[in-house]
Image (cartoon, rainbow, N blue to C red):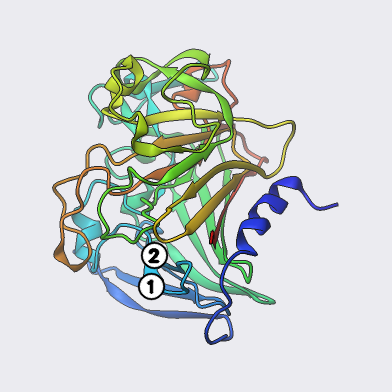
Amino acid sequence: MIEPALVVAVAALLAAPPPATATKPTVAKAEYGRTPEGAAVDVYTLTNANGLEVRAITYGAYVVSLKTPDRQGRLDDVVLGFDTLDGYLQSGSHMGSVVGRYGNRIANAKFTLDGRTYPLAANDGVNHLHGGVKGFDRHVWTGEAVRKGEDVGVRFTLVSPDGDEGYPGRLETTVTYTLTPKNELVVEYEGTTDKPTVVNLTQHSYFNLAGQHSGDILDHELQIHADRVTTAGPGLIPTGALASLDGSPLDFRKTTRIGARIDHDDAQLQLGRGYDHNYVVNRAGPGLVPAARLADPKSGRVMEVLTTEPGLQLYTGNWLGEEKGKAGRVYPRRSGVCLETQHYPDSPNRPEFPSTVVRPGETYRSKTVFAFGVTR
């Protein structure tokens, strides 16, 4: 039986124009640069038979470009980023990286597990954000090209030692990016540990489906399959409440322009200077379910997001506006939108939230699909 979630994604893809010239799927490796310490960084380029192209580097497992066609079949890069390794070394905006060990925020930069309190780096005011000062986005991973039939991909691996950024346990992590013939970028995460720890990995690309240098994303249309959000308090730390979206400017259950209510005087929006909120993904059971649909009316590009995760963080680039991106051009505020599939913020301190604890003998697993297509 085909999962309903996958039917949703495939329906969007069927609207895509046929490629002008079909090619065989390929995965190629090349040198990208070197860190200040002299470590080599490689780039893996994945292409499918439809001409879609994904490039990802071993530093931070960053997706540095993602080219997909518009309704006329013209390719454009739809993720924000930089032209060289230096940009990723210097940036603090996580443009395209894997975030870990814990994506999102942990209150007061500490958590208690099995009766022991673990202090973490306070790198977001008094709170801990995206794995700390040197999270997974600041490490060189090991890369390996993978192929399975018409699927091409890259498998990144990283060993995080016991005590890394304050987290307990030696964590062995694998993240695999796979480009499929159905124009899907599949992201699969796995992790094992030798001590009880917490894990919450996510992919932090900033998407602009009109093209990464086309201005803001306020005219993008968004639907999120969630009836509730985790209510945020100071520092965007959850209060513990799961609030209904009825009557809220955070409600995207019906397709809505991102800019339609982003500057509403709602207290939740004021906290984040726009959208920076965790949505509770609707699901009836385990497995992949639709989480969001993003569309750009001008280009016709559509992106469906499906995930095994319980939450989705919507972030609308509210703090962009100073960094020079690709081609040396500054990305204006709100020029990209992040749809980060993950567990809820501050889950290690919220036993009522889905658990992020991983113990020896267990395997952390997570899967997200970004499916690209067009509308006419």
Would you call the spot at circle 2 few (<14 residues within 10 Å), some (14-19), or many (20 or more)? many
Q: Nearer the viewer, residue 129 or 51?
A: 51
Residue 298 appears left or right of 6: left
Q: Which residue shows up at 51% across the image and 71% down it?
A: 144
Q: Nearer the viewer, residue 133 or 75?
A: 75
Q: Which residue shows up at 25% across the image and 58% down it?
A: 88
Where is residue 256 shown, x and y percent of the image? 46, 36
Q: Which residue is mark 1?
A: 43
- The numbered dot on residue 58 is 2
The amino acid type of the residue labelled 2 equals: Thr
Let me know if residue 218 appears in the view. Answer: yes
Where is residue 117 shown, x and y percent of the image? 42, 19
Where is residue 102 shown, x and y percent of the image? 43, 37
Q: Which residue shows up at 36% across the image and 56% down it?
A: 60
Where is residue 159 shown, x and y percent of the image? 46, 53
Q: Which residue shows up at 60% across the image and 25% down it?
A: 354
Contact flag, marks 1 and 2 (Cβ < 8 Å): yes
Q: Please give the count of numbered marks on the rendered protein.
A: 2
Q: In the structure shown, which secondary structural element does the residue marked by tag 1 occupy?
A: strand
**Which label's residue is closer to the chain start, 1 or 2?**
1
The amino acid type of the residue labelled 1 equals: Val
Residue 234 appears left or right of 252: left
